[in-house]
Image (spheres, coloured by chain):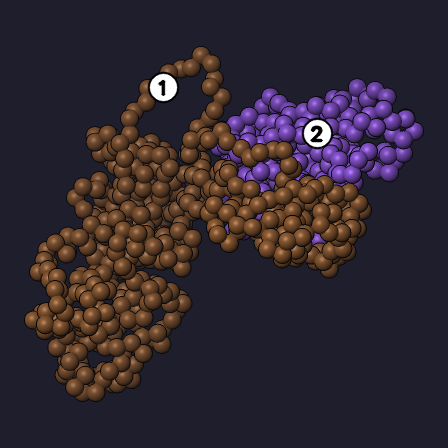
Amino acid sequence: MRPEPAIESLRAQIEKIEGKGRRVKSVLPFGITEIDSRLPAGGLTLGALHEIAGGGNGAVDGAAAALFAAGVAARTKGKVLWVITRPDLFAPALAQAGLAPDRVIYVEAGNDKTVLACIEEGLRHGGLGAVVGEVARLDMTASRRLQLCAEGSGTIGIALRRWRRQTEASDFGQPTAAATRWRVSVIPSAALPVPGVGRHRWLLELIRARAGESADFEVEACDDSGRLALPAELVHRPASAEGRRRGASG
Amino acid sequence: MVLAVDAAAQAAGVRVGMPATKARVLVQGLIVHDHDAVADAQALDRLALWMLQRYAPIVTADAPDGLVIDSTGADHLHGGEDAMLAGLIDRLAASGVQARAAIADTWGVAHALARYAAKPALVAPAGHGSAVLASLPLAALRLPVDMITALHVLGFERIGDILAQPRAPLTLRFGPQLGRRIDQALGALSEPINPIRPDELIQVKRNFAEPIGAAQTIARYIGKLVVQLCAELGAKGLGAKRLDLICHRVDNRLQAIRVGTAMPVRDVKRLTRLLTDKIETIEPGFGIEILSLTATLAEPLCEKQSLTAMVDDGVPDVSDLVDTLINRVGERSLYRAAPIATEVPERSVRRIAPMAPDTGATWPGHWPRPSRLLTTPEPIETMALLPDHPPVAFTWRGIRRRVRHADGPERIRGEWWLRDAELTAVRDYFRVEDDAGERYWIFRSGDGEDPNSGSQRWFLHGVFG
């Protein structure tokens, strides 16, 4: 169904109020039509803050979320600033997700306040490809600051939400100014005809997208250039399955 | 008289303070050098300059045999007080200087602890009071030798004995110096450290008729000083790598700010920004009388002619961002990762400076690596067939997981060419996936057969995304 003209003009007005016209926005598409079509700009907006968290145990270890962020950062140009709080990020894994070690500058920050300050500094600079920061608490004020810095410089900011305990992950429901909010959970990999572990798979939940709707996708994890892929059997699945999935995600 | 002895002479029984003739009789073939006070003082000043350029903005020689450093605001850049002392002693040891060091609340206490308690490093807890001093000998108080002898005659051995005595009779007998040294050690009397500023360092200074205190005022004058400093640096063709701003307060205390850059810089705007970022760490107290700005470390800087490029080279310079972040979180906290050619995963990453030239190297990619690596592998309970099957199930952190799929083994051998203990050490790594789809990196220490190759116990080492 095509949207009404009145709604179109209202949308234009809202966009004007939101200050979206300030800068010609470019996007970073995933290269997967199913995902890109669900994002309002046709991809992840550069010059915006995006939130990524892990689901289940991933809320604490953030292993899949970190790789997802690495995949996004790998597809940008320029150096990447990666602000960490715990020293368990294993650089070879990032290299395998397409993020070459020469491109990543790590910053070890002791607490959330320093993490936020470092992300802000990185976003404001404008010369970086992406800024990734592991942060537990992110309130409206802090995220708004980061979002404004990102808008000003055009650098993509990724807040990798990671908590100390599973129970603190409920914090993820709090509103923030981020443009999109993702949850990445691991799901069983594709069964292989031989013993072994197939290509890793994630359940990618788009929980919130500004001016867009939420959705979820089953994807295959980043390859060596940071690209996701849709599992082969899902690309050609019957229409009824599509409807069921969407119903479940609502 | 013997003024200093090395370790060998010490072992032979030579002691400081012994007449030189006696020492010669005691040890056959003793090598004796005449004391050269001037050369000693010069060497100490050189060492002080070296400390100044590497550790803290306020350093001076504590003649005849020591250095005093005001480490306030400088220790966190070196990983905390303990790490800084350990690193300092190691570095000195590497250049053949045996040193002892201590950190305390006042110059007096640090002087005493470094000489009489440190083995070889000691950090007194902040707010330690007089308790740390009580058990030290009187000589630790920086008093003249004859006064110490006189005190010994009266039966005072330790500083604690003096502290327990009423002050007036002691002052009457020994003059004001004894009381002053005690007060300085206890922090009741301030003892400013007059930082060394050798002539070759570029320094600009501004005296204020009226003390200043507001952050905006300080920022404005920092801006003016930086302009002057950059002009002087420009005249010599240098760029600053380390800047020290010292604020002399009305109450005779010093406050210092140190900023560093990865490359030599002579950009007024950038240096001003680095300094003004740190204004909040200054406590102006009743006001600042003198601001002095020194380029502690300066290196030649060539002006680059910037051409308007027809094509964008696409690599924006981020060195200014790196400097800003280093000044915020410390030099050690900012790094890039570079590969080391080793099979042992926890040793395969080394840290290099953030602005180091690109190495282009990466890790071999034929085996997947987990995105989270535990700092120490955690033991797990497993059920597994030997010798080379993955476990059927394992228990980690109290949760039992059934293994659905597994990949492996990837055999990793110890670095026998570096460590003898790892000559036969083997680890067999498996990538396992449980029912819920969570993927872990586990290994068995040992090859499953030979007890020499490891304990044959299982560990979890990483979490895959």
The residue drawn where x is 56% and y is 42% is B343
Q: Residue furthest top?
A: B310
On-image quarter of the C terminus of chain B: top right
Q: Secondary structure at mark 2?
A: loop
Q: What's the colour of chain A in the image?
A: purple
Q: Which picture quadrant has residue B296?
A: top left
Q: From the viewer's perspective, is residue B424 above or below residue B158?
A: above
State left or right for residue B300 relative to residue A173: left
Q: Which residue is mark 1?
A: B306
Chain of the residue under label 1:
B
The residue drawn where x is 73% and y is 34% is A199
Residue A90 at x, y percent in the picture: 58, 42
Chain of the residue under label 2:
A
Q: CA distance from mark 2 to mark 1?
A: 40 Å
Q: From the viewer's perspective, is residue B303 above or below residue B278?
A: above
Chain painted in brown in the figure:
B
